[in-house]
Amino acid sequence: MYIPRKIDKFLADWKSEQNRKPLIVKGSRQVGKTESIRHFAADNYDSFIEINFVEEPKYTMITSDGYKTDDIIKNISLIDPSKKFIDGKTLIFFDEIQSFPDIATSLKFFKQDGRFDVICSGSMLGINYRKIESNSVGYKKDYIMRSLDFEEFLWAKGYDDSFRENLFSHMIDQKPFSELELSVCRSLFLDFCVLGGMPAVVSQYIENGTFEGSLDTQRQLLADYKEDIRKYAEGVDQTRILNVFNRIAPQLAKKNKKFQISKVASGARFRDYRGCIDWLVDAGIVNPCYCLNFPELPLKGNYDEDKFKLYFADSGLLVAMLDDEAQDDLRANKNLGVYKGALYENIVGEALVKSGCDLYYYRREDSTLEQDFFMRTKDSLVPVEVKAENGRAKSLKTLINSDKYADIKFGVKLFNGNVGYSDNVYSFPYFCAFLLKEFLQTK
């Protein structure tokens, strides 16, 4: 079963470009890159040449005579004469290029030659991307692919674009959802919270119609990520990176969700672990959320890079780290327990990143004011509150009403309630988070 993805339209648009460059699809492991590229190739090319540098390391020899297109085509044909290169009708797919970043040097020559389309991809591409970038600068186009967002999950469940358009119209018109709409959307969103967006997990859920087997699949993905850390991280950093990875969930469960290096290991110092955080970010495993120096515009350059929260890039990884009792309660009763706040924050942060936003928060030194996220319109800073319970948003109101924060004119609250507007605060159900950036573009 193929799940439609947003990359499908991007690939179709790329193919329609007259002077298209080779494409590099970046993203963490098992988010669906290879499957989407294969699906695209089947619909658009007479010949599809797929080369995986991890599964078939012999192909690292194809540049032994140089990086020009004819030399590479000749050497691929020497290894496998069944591969057919048809001018103008062939897609060459170099997969797992993190194991052979030198192939990026050939992209210049493929672009200049123009006979064949080329797509490159890799599970841990961010780790070696500086070398890939330097070898192909000016001769490639990039696309970042992530696990399914809520809209893609809705597609997988059979809902078309009219469902999304209805959600958005409720936000724009400030029209509350009916009880039926709320019930259906909340149920879908809670299922998405439990599953996360990894295609293997979602496909299994769609095919079975239940959560059966989903936890085993999530935990296998978690084990695969840890194995990637052992495989691609070097030396002592392996242990430190794994220590950081294993401490993300427990730290998110605390009221103060700022990631504290001192809690990772006995005697841990920030300078010894900074590179570990960067490694996990580059690998696409975590989303960092940086603390603003002060709630004002601009956002970029106005934050402390040493103060941050860490969220999982896919909430399914957080769910997979819960203990057995919490798992049973979560799947049987949709009870999120002590992790309720952490999971809702994680999934909202994930939605914002997948819609193209960077993550920022604010916490005053005396802890008297804390705001979960910040977004922006053209000329306003917008605080975003994620409420696990339907209580008052004290910090949100302080930011809006105080003269200290001139860039803030209104705020947004995401909670387990309905659409509303009061005291310069727009309120939306959690399941609207994936549409928040588009909504703010109308303000």
Image: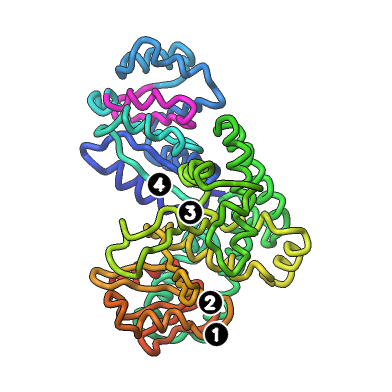
Q: Quarter-wise, where is residue 324 in the image?
A: bottom right
Chain part drawn in magenta = 85-108
Q: Amino acid at mark 3?
A: Asn
* Residue 133 position in % (x across, y down): 33, 33
State how far apart marks 3 and 2 are (Cα).
Answer: 20 Å
Q: Earlier in the sequence, mark 2 or mark 4?
A: 4
Q: How far apart are labels 4 and 1 at the CA level?
A: 37 Å
Give residue 425's mark.
none
Q: Which mark is residue 287?
A: 3
Labels 2 and 1 touching (C-beta < 8 A)? yes
Which of labels 4 and 1 is toward the front? 1
Residue drawn at x 62%, y 57% as measured from the top left: 249
Whole-percent x, y for residue 243 in the image: 63, 45
Say which amino acid is labelled 2: Lys
Mark 2 = which residue?
Answer: 387
Look at 48% across and 60% down and name the residue there.
350
